[in-house]
Amino acid sequence: MRRRLIAIVVGALFCVFAPTGAAMAQVQAPPDGQVVLIGVPGLMWSDVNPADTPNLWKLAGSSAVGSLSVRTVGNITCPYDGWLTVSAGVRSAVGARCGMPPTPERQGEGAVVPEFNWLWEVRDQQNAGTLGQAVHDARQCTMAVGPGAALALADRQGKVDVYADTPAQVTDWTRCKVIAIDAGDLITPYIEDDKVTSAVEKLTPEARRAAVRAADAKLAPALLHLATSTVLVAGLADHGSVPHLRAAMMFTPGPKGPGGSFDLGSRSTHRDDMVILPDFTSTILAHVVDVPPATVVGTAMEAHASGAGSVGEQADALKVADVAGQTIRNNTGVFFTALAVLQVVFYITAFLLMRRRDGLRGVRIAAITLASIPVSTYLVNLLPWARAPQPTLTLFSAIVVGAIVLSAVALLGPWRRTLLGPPTVVAGVTAAVLLADLLTGTSLQLNGMMGYTGVVGARYYGLGNIPFALLATAVLLVTTAVADRLVRSGRKTLAVGLVAGLGGFAMLLDGWPGVGSDFGGVIAFVPGIAVAALIVAGKRVSIIKLGAFCVAGGVLVMGIAYLDYLRPAADQTHLGRFVGQVFDGTFLPVISRKLGAMLHTLINPNLMPVVIAAFAFLVFALLRPGKASAGVLPLAFERAPTLKAGLLGALVSGVVGMLVNDSGAAVLSMALALAVPLVLSAGIRALEPGGDRESVPAPLAEPSPAEQPA
């Protein structure tokens, strides 16, 4: 009976968390037949239309289409980097020579990329040539048309079997199973001194349309002969100093399914309408080899039935996706600067008013409203703000309105009479929104002001570092608020179980591959939950225990990552790939890069003021309560003893999260930005007439100074 129960539970978890790509995919690239990659560096969906690009428009009408995130190593991807990434199957960059790919040197009917070994000997691009070498190892032929195509298909010696400068020079399109075509006419006008221009947009609209028409016309001879081939189109580079989402297509010969249009996605992004450059490498290799090289990080692209009725509607939606990503990217700095200013002004004002016990109600309202801003940045993605005539104004207005509405609900609802009612509502809504988003594909975090974008390309799915900080803080505050009622009624064991159980559930969602896929979050979540649960139980927390909890978090996430590693390579997330890097000894650059990014955040002018102001206010309010905050925090902890457990648990998760995540100070600053105003609002409520006067049980055991949490 016990074995059967375990089998049922494991089976249920597998059904919930197993990859759903196979079930969702309607059309997938066939493993046989000729495959052709057409690279049009700089191509966006705003360029593709029946008038300027008749050939590409016709191809799009019978293809699965999507957005392409061309992010490689730097903020901008030049054509050289884009083609090199396809060659390597992993994000790659050439460095100082970033611009156009080198011109191949002819050798008989083929060609060789000059000084190809320079890439791994000097530029440390060890994976250059992976695609071409795998094709040759499978005893298949490669044909390259144009310099970029030769770079993409070159083997480890830099060779391609058949080479032509333009499609018009090709007389036999059936010579090779794998073909790449470089239609670089669009990007050429943007090259200055052999590099992509630093201007945002160098060309006039008329000049850009002319360049797009030239690229489309160059492809006409090829497309006439490739009707029975799998054709991939990639706008695989940026055209200026600002990154964009680019156009991606996949045409597969044969029946397309029940009819209608199709979106192009991949398991790399966990998005039905977005792919990354290494996915093109994997899709090409799926036609050639059974198992791709282990270093290739992309997955074969898949077509999914689209809700759009025509390619025009699809193109319009993909253009809006780029607008959304651009709006978030362009305004992230403004948003976090404004948030930092609001936080600092709030703490200074609260300090001055609370010393005189004046304006406490206004401080409380401001605290609840300030804490309502983070979740509002996700809820606005339920609205089509990117389609508005002024997306930026619409976005910021919606965030402000959302925060005001949520704070009004928290402060005016029937729970307003209780000490923990309003802050629990805000924390509860924050936790519920983020958990629901995790379980439904994280559509609210994508293109969210506190989320991530495909334009930037740092993350495409799962729980980002800032959302983790908010989720951990919200869950700990909500569970300890509910635990307070249970402790009052003498059900302390149930209270501890609630904190550990619900916190553990959120932690598993955070770290589970394909759901949260958050490595550092689990390490930080475990000690936060443990500290909160121990304090609720009346137990002491020592430095040794805290260190053990951090180790436990690391062991747990490595276990999850190892289970991910055991899955097929195409199904693995970055958690499983990291285990593979540990096994082959290539993990140190990853650790070094993340450590450097974390240290860099410590001087961020938008993040550190929040950390400094919140910590200074919190410490002063606890050490000098009469002078700093009219004694509201000690009073709040006296009236609701478990509130301290939630606050300390959130602080522990924030500090550990800062140390183990590349977002560094962003994690701690957002934990403080949510926790401190909510706890402060509870304390002010205790001072107001009619505040919570319920009798409380004996205070929870206080740790000695030597055993205070770090």
Image (spheres, rainbow, N blue to C red):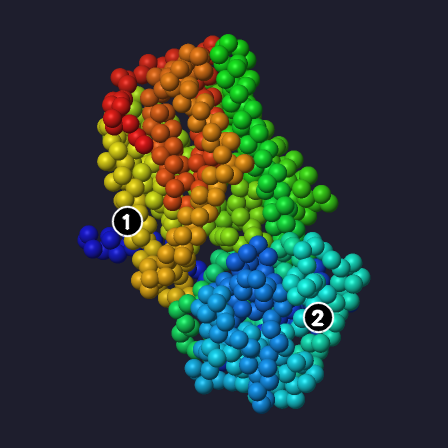
- Which residue does the numbered mark 2 point to in the structure image? 185
Badge 2 local density, few (<14 within 10 Å), some, or many (20+)? Answer: many
Q: Position of residue 188 (x, y in %)?
A: 70, 68
**Residue 177 seen in the figure:** no
Which label belongs to residue 610? Answer: none
Q: Position of residue 13 (x, y in %)?
A: 34, 53
Question: Front-most of 169 and 260?
Answer: 169
Residue shown at 35% from the left, 29% from the top: 648
Q: Secondary structure at mark 1?
A: helix
Question: Front-most of 242 and 51?
Answer: 242
Residue shown at 27% from the left, 39% from the top: 547
Please state the total of marks drawn on the protein image. 2
Q: Is residue 585 left or right of residue 399?
A: left
Q: Secondary structure at mark 2?
A: loop
Q: Position of residue 675 (x, y in %)?
A: 44, 29
Question: Front-most of 303 and 52?
Answer: 52
Instruction: Please say if 103 is above or below 373.
Output: below
Q: Earlier in the sequence, mark 1 or mark 2?
A: 2
Amino acid found under the numbered disc labelled 2: Asp
Query: CA separation, marks 1 and 2?
Result: 52 Å
Q: Position of residue 446 (x, y in %)?
A: 54, 49
Q: Residue furthest right?
A: 206
Residue shown at 61% from the left, 50% from the top: 325
Amino acid found under the numbered disc labelled 1: Val
Residue shown at 49% from the left, 34% from the top: 608
Badge 1 local density, few (<14 within 10 Å), some, or many (20+)? Answer: some
**Residue 550 seen in the figure:** yes
Q: Residue furthest front?
A: 122
Judge depth for marks 1 and 2 and give the one in front. Answer: 2
- Which residue does the numbered mark 1 point to in the structure image? 555
Question: Front-most of 233 and 344?
Answer: 344
Hey, which quadrant is residue 139 in on the image? bottom left
